[in-house]
C-alpha cells in the first residue's frame, strides 16, 4: 500500500481537529432504490466534524474512488466514511482508495447501508433512510477517533500443507511442488487417491479412472517437493498465516518403509510391497475400500495401485501371531509394537481438500438399502463394474450372483430433498455418473435394460448435454419422477414404484437390480479439521469459501484455502480446476515472502495495569504474559506477533488497561453514544 | 397502536459469524424491521460489560450481543468468555431497575441469514412488549 500518513499528522504531534468526508453509494438502484441517498448525504453534513458529503452511483468504481482521493487532498480530511455495501466486501477497496489519497488506510470506516440496510428494508423507505442516517452517524463517530496504524509484516515460511489426498489434494500438491514449494501432503487413509481411485470410468469421456489417476498418484509419491504422509491426521494447529505450526499424528502402520528401515540401520530392509506377509496372515476381514464386497487380511493393501506401496496392519484385527514377521524375513519391515507418532511442522499456507462421503442412504428406508440384497449404492456399482473390482468387472446381483438384465437407477437419492431426511442441495455429479452407469450396463450386458428415475437431468458441463443425448440414443429409458417406494419380490427382484410426472400416471417397473445415486456430504473428519483451522462452514456443513465469486478458494482464516468437494459437490474437472486455483492462491503469500497482518493487536497501558494477571488466561493464543517493567512494577505485556486481535483480553480487563487497536473502548463507546445521544432525541 | 414509539436497539456483533450472517440475510433479501443498529467488533470476546451498560445508561430500549456458535468462534473461545461475562450484565440490570429481557445474547453463524432475521424480529418484539426504557424517559425529563 502507498500512503504516507502525512496529511493526518500535519503540524507535528499537535492534535488535529477531525475533518471527515462522507460518501454515500447508490450501488446502482440496490441502495438508491430503497432509501433516500440524497437525504442521507445532506444529513451527514449536519454531523459534527463532517466537512464534505457526497453521493455517487458506484463508489467502488474508479470515479468513485477518485472522489475519495480528491476530497482527501482538497478538504484535508483526517477520516473517510463510505456508506455502501459491507466491509466484508469492500473495506479493502476503500482502504486502498484512502491510502492513495495520502491518508493512513486505517482512517477509513464503513457504514453498511446495503446488505444490512436497503436489502433488508426494501419496502420501508422512511425506516431504511433513518437507519442509514444512524449508521452514518455511528461510522462518523468512529472515524473522528481513528488513528494511523501500520500493519505488521511477518515472513512467510516457504512450505505448504495439503490435508486430504484425493484428486484435489494430489493436484494441488503437485502444482505447489512444481512451483518450488515444499509441500506436506497429509492423508488419513493408507493410500492417496480418494474417491476417484474407486471409480471405473469417468464421464463424459469415459476414460478409465485409474488410468488417468494412477500415473498422477505415482508421480506425487515420487516428487521430491512432496513430503507424503499417509495414515496421518492433523492433531493440532497453532500460529497464523505465514507461520502455522501444525502437529501431525502418524498412526502406527506396523510396517516400515525402506527409508524408515534404513534409518533404523536395517540394511536393504523395509517393505517392498511383495505381499508375502499378507499370504500368511490368518485373519480375514472385509475390505472396506471395496465396501466389504471383497476380503482382506489384517496386514493389507487396499488395492493394487496404492501409493505408497507399503502394507498396513489393521491393529484392531491383528492377533499378533508374528507369522508376517517371519514371512517378511530379512527385510525386517514389520514392527508389531509400533506406536503413533506426533511431529510438528511449520508451514506458510494450508489447503484443505478433505473431500466427501456418501449420505447414509439407508436412512431413506422406503428404498430398502441394506434391507434388500439387490439395492446397491452408486459407489458399490462402480466397484462391481470395474475390471479391477471384486467381480473383475462382471456386474452381478448380490443375492444370487446372476447377471442383471434390467437395472433401475434412482437419481437424487437423498439429494434435493427437503423432507428432513436427506440433503436440500443438488449433489451435482449423480445425474452424469448415472448416465455413465446406464451406458456401462447397456454396453457390457447385451439386452440389459436401463431405467433412470430422475427429477431433472442436469448435464451442464462441457460436452455433458451431448453425452446425455448419446445415452438416450443407446436406449436407456428415462422416467421423470421421484421413486416413492421399492419393494422386494419373492425372487429378490425389485418393484420400483414411482410417478411418471410427464405422463401424469403412476408406474411400477420390475427390475433385477437397483442402484441408488446417493447424495454426498462432507466427511466426518472434515468437521474436526475445520475447527482446528478455524474455517467456517455453510448450513449444509460444506466448508465455506471467503466469497463465492471473488474468493472461491480462500477462507475467512488468512492463509487457509479450499480445494475439491470439501467446499461443495463438484465433478473431477471442476475439482481439478479449483485445486489448481487453490495452489495458485496458496503460493502467492509464499512467493511474496511476507504478509501484512492487520494491526488489530492488543497493547497494555501500563499506567492503568494493576498487575493482577487475570487477563493472561483469557487469551486463547498465549499472547499475554506478566513482566516487571522499568519502574519495578509487575505489568502485563503483549507479544504482538501472537495476538490475533480478538479483543477478549480487552473486553475483560477490569481496569481498562488493555487497548485494542482499531477497536478501542473510546471508539466503541463513541459509536454507542453517537447512536443514542447523537441523533434527534 | 403505539405507532409513535420506535424502540432504539443496538446490536454489538462479531465480524466472523453474526455480521456475516446479517450480510447473508441481505444477500437473500430477507426482510426485517429496521429498529436495530449495528456496531461491529472482531469477536464477542471484545465486548466489555461496560459497553452494554453504557448503552442502557444512554437510554437503550434493548441491547443485542451476537456471535458465533460455541466451538465456532474465529478465535476459539471468545464467545464463551463473553457469554460468562454477560451473565453479570443481567444482574446489574436488575439493580438498575431494568427488565433483563431487554438484553439478549445470541449465536448466529455466517450461513444463518434466515435465523438472523428471526432473532431481530424476536428482539424487537420483546422490547416492544416491555416498552420504552425508563432510563430514556428519565433522561428526557432531566433534559439530558
Ligand atoms: C459413484 C460416483 C461416480 C462418480 N463418477 C464421476 C465421473 O465419472 N466423473 C467425474 O468427473 N466425477 C465423478 N464423481 C465425482 C468424483 O468422485 C469427485 O469429483 C472427486 O473424487 C473429488 O475429489 P476430492 O479430492 O475433492 O475428494 P475425495 O476423492 O473424497 O478425496 C478426499 C481425500 O481426503 C482424505 N481425507 C478426508 N478427511 C481427511 C482428514 N481429516 N485428514 C486427512 N485426510 C483426509 C480422504 O481420505 C480422501 O482421500 C463420481 C462420484 C461418485 C460418488
Ligand atoms: S492488563 Fe488488566 S487484567 Fe491484565 S494484568 Fe493488567 S490490570 Fe490485570
Ligand atoms: S486481543 Fe488479547 S486475547 Fe485476543 S489474541 Fe490478542 S492478546 Fe490474546
Ligand atoms: S469471532 Fe464470532 S464470537 Fe468470536
Image (spheres, rainbow, N blue to C red):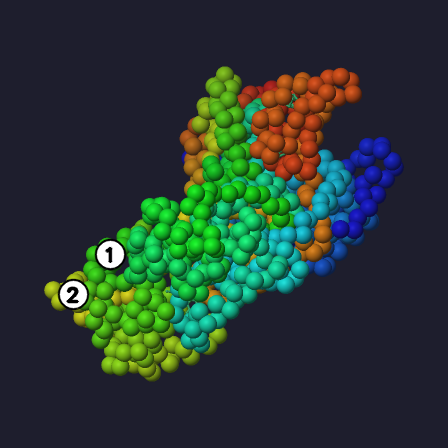
Q: Is residue A523 at all visible to an observer of this figure?
A: no
Q: Which mark is residue A492?
A: 2
Q: Chain of mark 2?
A: A
**Residue drawn at 70 percent across, 40 percent down:** A599
Report the image quarter containing ligand 1. bottom left
**Pointer 2 or 1: first along the chain:** 1
Q: Secondary structure at mark 1?
A: loop
Q: Is mark 1 within 8 Å of ligand 1?
A: no
Q: Is residue A263 at all visible to an observer of this figure?
A: yes
**In this rendering, is residue B97 above or below B14?**
above
**In this rendering, is residue B57 above or below A415?**
above
Report the Cα–Cα distance between label 2 and label 1.
13 Å
Residue A644 horizontal/vertical position (percent)? 63, 38
The residue pinned by badge 1 equals A370
Residue A238 horizontal/vertical position (percent)? 58, 40
Query: Residue lying farthest left?
Result: A490
Amino acid at each position: 500500500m502507498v500512503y504516507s500518513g502525512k496529511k493526518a499528522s500535519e503540524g507535528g504531534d499537535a492534535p488535529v481537529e477531525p475533518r471527515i468526508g462522507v460518501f454515500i453509494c447508490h450501488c446502482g438502484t440496490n441502495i438508491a432504490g430503497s432509501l433516500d441517498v440524497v437525504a442521507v448525504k445532506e444529513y451527514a453534513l449536519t454531523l459534527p466534524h463532517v466537512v464534505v458529503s457526497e453521493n455517487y452511483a458506484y463508489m467502488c468504481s474508479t470515479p468513485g474512488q477518485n472522489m475519495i482521493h480528491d476530497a482527501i487532498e482538497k478538504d484535508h480530511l483526517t477520516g473517510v466514511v463510505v456508506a455502501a455495501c459491507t466491509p466484508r466486501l469492500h473495506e479493502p477497496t476503500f482502504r486502498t482508495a484512502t491510502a492513495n489519497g495520502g491518508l493512513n488506510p486505517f482512517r477509513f470506516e464503513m457504514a453498511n447501508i446495503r446488505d444490512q440496510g436497503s436489502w433488508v428494508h426494501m419496502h420501508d423507505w422512511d425506516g431504511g433512510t433513518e437507519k442509514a442516517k444512524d449508521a452514518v452517524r455511528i461510522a462518523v463517530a468512529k472515524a473522528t477517533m481513528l488513528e494511523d496504524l501500520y500493519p505488521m509484516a511477518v515472513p512467510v515460511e516457504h512450505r505448504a500443507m495439503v490435508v486430504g489426498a484425493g484428486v484435489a489434494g494430489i493436484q494441488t500438491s503437485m502444482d505447489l511442488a512444481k512451483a518450488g514449494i515444499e509441500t506436506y501432503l497429509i492423508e488419513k487413509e493408507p493410500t492417496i487417491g480418494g474417491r476417484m481411485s474407486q471409480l471405473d470410468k469417468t464421464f463424459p469421456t469415459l476414460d478409465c479412472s485409474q488410468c488417468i489417476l494412477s500415473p498422477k498418484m505415482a508421480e506425487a509419491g515420487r516428487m521430491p517437493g512432496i513430503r507424503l504422509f499417509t495414515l496421518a491426521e492433523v492433531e493440532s494447529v497453532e500460529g497464523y498465516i505465514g507461520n502455522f505450526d501444525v502437529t501431525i499424528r502418524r498412526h502406527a502402520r506396523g510396517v516400515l518403509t525402506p527409508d524408515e528401515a534404513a534409518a533404523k540401520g536395517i540394511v536393504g530392509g523395509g517393505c517392498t510391497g511383495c505381499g508375502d506377509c499378507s499370504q500368511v496372515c490368518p485373519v480375514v476381514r472385509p475390505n472396506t475400500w471395496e465396501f466389504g464386497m471383497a476380503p482382506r487380511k489384517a496386514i493389507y493393501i487396499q488395492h493394487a495401485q496404492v501409493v505408497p506401496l507399503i502394507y498396513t496392519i489393521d491393529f484392531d484385527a491383528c492377533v499378533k501371531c508374528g507369522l508376517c514377521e517371519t514371512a517378511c524375513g530379512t527385510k525386517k519391515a514389520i514392527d508389531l509394537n509400533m506406536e503413533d507418532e506426533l511431529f510438528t511442522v511449520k508451514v506458510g499456507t494450508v489447503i484443505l481438500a478433505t473431500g466427501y462421503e456418501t449420505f447414509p442412504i439407508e436412512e431413506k428406508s422406503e428404498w430398502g438399502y441394506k434391507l434388500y440384497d439387490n439395492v446397491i449404492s452408486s459407489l458399490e456399482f462402480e466397484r462391481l463394474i470395474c475390471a479391477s473390482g471384486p467381480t473383475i468387472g462382471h456386474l452381478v446381483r448380490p443375492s444370487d450372483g446372476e447377471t442383471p438384465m434390467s437395472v433401475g437407477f434412482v437419481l437424487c437419492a437423498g439429494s434435493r430433498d427437503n423432507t428432513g431426511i436427506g440433503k436440500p442441495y443438488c449433489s451435482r455429479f449423480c445425474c452424469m455418473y448415472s448416465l455413465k452407469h446406464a451406458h456401462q450396463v447397456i454396453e457390457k450386458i447385451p439386452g440389459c435394460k436401463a431405467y433412470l428415475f430422475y427429477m431433472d437431468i442436469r448435464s451442464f458441463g462441457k460436452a455433458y448435454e451431448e453425452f446425455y443425448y448419446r445415452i438416450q440414443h443407446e436406449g436407456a429409458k428415462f422416467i421423470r419422477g421421484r421413486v416413492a417406494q421399492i419393494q422386494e419380490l419373492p425372487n429378490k427382484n425389485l418393484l420400483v414404484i414411482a410417478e411418471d410426472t410427464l405422463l401424469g400416471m403412476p408406474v411400477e417397473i420390475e427390475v433385477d437390480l437397483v442402484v441408488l445415486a446417493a447424495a454426498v456430504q462432507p466427511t466426518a473428519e472434515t468437521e474436526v479439521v475445520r475447527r482446528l483451522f478455524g474455517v467456517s462452514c455453510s448450513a449444509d456443513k460444506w466448508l465455506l469459501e471467503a466469497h463465492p465469486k471473488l474468493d472461491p478458494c480462500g477462507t475467512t482464516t488468512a492463509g487457509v484455502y479450499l480445494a475439491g468437494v470439501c467446499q461443495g459437490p463438484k465433478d473431477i474437472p471442476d475439482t481439478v480446476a479449483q485445486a489448481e486455483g487453490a495452489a495458485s492462491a496458496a503460493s502467492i503469500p509464499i512467493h511474496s515472502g511476507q504478509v501484512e497482518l492487520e494491526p488489530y493487536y492488543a497493547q497494555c497501558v501500563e499506567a492503568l495495569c494493576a498487575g493482577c494477571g487475570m487477563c493472561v488466561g483469557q487469551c486463547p493464543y498465549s499472547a499475554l504474559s506478566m513482566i516487571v517493567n522499568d519502574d519495578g512494577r509487575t505489568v502485563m505485556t503483549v507479544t504482538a506477533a501472537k495476538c490475533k486481535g480478538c479483543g477478549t483480553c480487552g473486553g475483560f480487563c477490569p481496569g481498562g488497561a488493555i487497548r485494542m487497536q482499531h477497536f478501542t473502548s473510546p471508539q466503541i463507546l463513541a459509536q454507542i453514544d453517537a447512536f443514542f445521544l447523537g441523533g434527534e432525541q | 397502536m403505539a405507532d409513535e414509539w420506535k424502540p432504539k436497539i443496538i446490536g454489538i456483533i462479531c465480524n466472523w459469524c453474526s455480521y456475516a450472517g446479517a450480510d447473508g440475510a441481505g444477500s437473500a433479501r430477507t426482510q426485517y424491521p429496521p429498529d436495530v443498529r449495528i456496531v461491529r467488533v472482531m469477536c464477542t470476546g471484545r465486548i466489555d460489560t461496560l459497553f452494554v451498560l453504557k448503552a442502557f445508561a444512554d437510554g437503550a430500549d434493548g441491547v443485542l450481543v451476537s456471535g458465533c456458535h460455541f466451538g465456532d468462534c474465529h478465535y476459539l473461545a471468545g464467545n464463551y468468555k463473553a457469554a460468562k461475562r454477560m451473565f453479570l450484565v443481567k444482574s446489574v440490570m436488575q439493580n438498575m431497575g431494568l427488565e433483563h429481557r431487554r438484553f439478549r445474547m445470541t449465536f448466529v453463524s455466517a450461513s444463518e441469514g434466515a435465523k438472523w432475521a428471526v432473532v431481530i424480529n424476536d428482539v424487537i418484539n420483546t422490547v416492544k412488549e416491555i416498552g420504552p426504557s425508563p432510563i430514556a424517559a428519565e433522561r428526557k425529563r432531566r433534559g439530558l
